[in-house]
Amino acid sequence: MGIMVTMRRLTIILGIFATTILLGSTGSIELVEGSYSDNTRGDSLKITGTGDKITFEFQNGSKFKFELDSGTYKTEKLSGDGSYILRISNEEQFELIDGATDKSIGTYKLYATPSLFKKLLSILVSSALVFSVIQAYLKVNKVWKRRKIVEVANSISIVAAMLGFAVGLPFLLNNIFITNDYFSAGKVILGLTLAVVFTLIGIGAFVDANRGVGFFTLLGRALNLERKESGELLSDMLRPKGARKIIDILKKLAAIDDDIAQEEIDLINQFSEKWNIEIPELKPGKPEEVTNLVELKALVQSYLDEGPDTDVAEGLVDLINLMAEADDEVTEEEAMAVAEFTGMIGYYVSAEKGGEMEMWEVNIVPQGDDQISAVREILPELDVVEDRGGRVFKVGRYFSEDYAEAVCSKYISLGLYSNTTKLMVDFSKVS
């Protein structure tokens, strides 16, 4: 008797258990992720997601999110009139039902599953939010400990930070209320958070000197500063290469005759304003610093070493001539400088384009061993060479005859015999 009761109880328990499994399996069938089609209607869609939430993406790009409700996947109609229901036959087939009329919209069957690459890509996309959080932290971390420094605050574009709100908010609303893409919504929220942080740093809210100053006052100051600096990048893009050195060359050329004319100042200011380069105020008359020809030549060479465009370099020749003639008086030193610098620039252009150019070579011809020793003391970097049957020191090549003669005169005044030799340099043969 006891055995019979026990068996009966066991049968009831097994029956209940089997029914639970059956009901559970019926209600927990999950559709395989992939592409489905209804052959009778010629319609297709893609299913992503598993568990309590799955997303339908139709050919036109619209998305619907179905959620599991009492064992049935449902989604509310956009019109608010009832809902759509999924009647799942098996993991690869389902029927889409209009909940309001209980009529079938279509029967869809699986015809393609995501490739391994797409699955991997899906995993990476899903983990993008984590990477975005790390990226955002690294961006903020770099400036956070410097947030109290005025220069750091001024280096942040307030307009760019505030545009983050204008761009991010529409996407956030779309992701939450239309597409239900919460991963993308999370990324947008992260972007908006960064926009808030950089806006606060950019207006100088953390700078000690700004304590007690209102938000809108700080914002106004920051916007005003950005307005003044808004053309910096564009100006740099429009400036010729080495523009600052061109201005320095013009300033030193104006002072080469130990007198700066107002016309020369006007020309310098014209180009400094055009290129948006700030320079100290120049006053006509005797310059504060004396400029010598050797120093100015080194500056021109430094400019050419930067490799400016040949068209810009040729334009500098005209600019140098304009500067020399600006005060309607060309001194001997100015004429010599113009000739030499014109030659230097011509040499640079010829080397870039190829061609032939005349130059003057300065030689010191020592008269005996005593003068050889003297030259070696004055110019230790030079070596004596055999040239035209004699021993000479080659001082250098120059671009204007006057400049070369001036160099010769310098060594002649020291009691050394010096001369100039004209030669032609063919750049087409220089590799």
Image (cartoon, grey):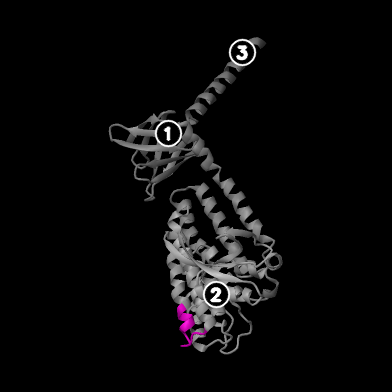
Q: Earlier in the sequence, mark 2 or mark 1?
A: 1
The residue under label 3 is which amino acid type?
A: Met
The residue under label 1 is which amino acid type?
A: Gly
Q: Earlier in the sequence, mark 2 or mark 3?
A: 3
- Give the class, few, some or many, for how many residues have Cα within 10 Å of label 3's Cα (few <14, many ≥20): few
Residue linked to disc 2: 405
Q: Secondary structure at mark 2?
A: helix
- Could you tell me how far apart the alpha carbons at marks 3 and 1 are, in whole angstroms? 47 Å
Vertical side of 77 occupied by 7: above or below: above
Residue linked to disc 1: 34
Between 222 and 166, the residue placed more toward the observer is 222
- Give the class, few, some or many, for how many residues have Cα within 10 Å of label 2's Cα (few <14, many ≥20): some
Q: Earlier in the sequence, mark 3 or mark 1?
A: 3
Between 344 and 391, the residue placed more toward the observer is 391
Vertical side of 18 occupied by 214: above or below: below
Measured from the top left, where is residue 135 in percent x and y?
Answer: 60, 51
- Magenta residues, start to end: 321-331
Q: Secondary structure at mark 3?
A: helix
Let me know if residue 221 appears in the view: no
Residue linked to disc 3: 7
- Could you tell me how far apart the alpha carbons at marks 2 and 1 are, in whole angstroms? 87 Å
- Could you tell me how far apart the alpha carbons at marks 2 and 3 are, in whole angstroms? 128 Å
Measured from the top left, where is residue 330 in percent x and y?
Answer: 49, 85
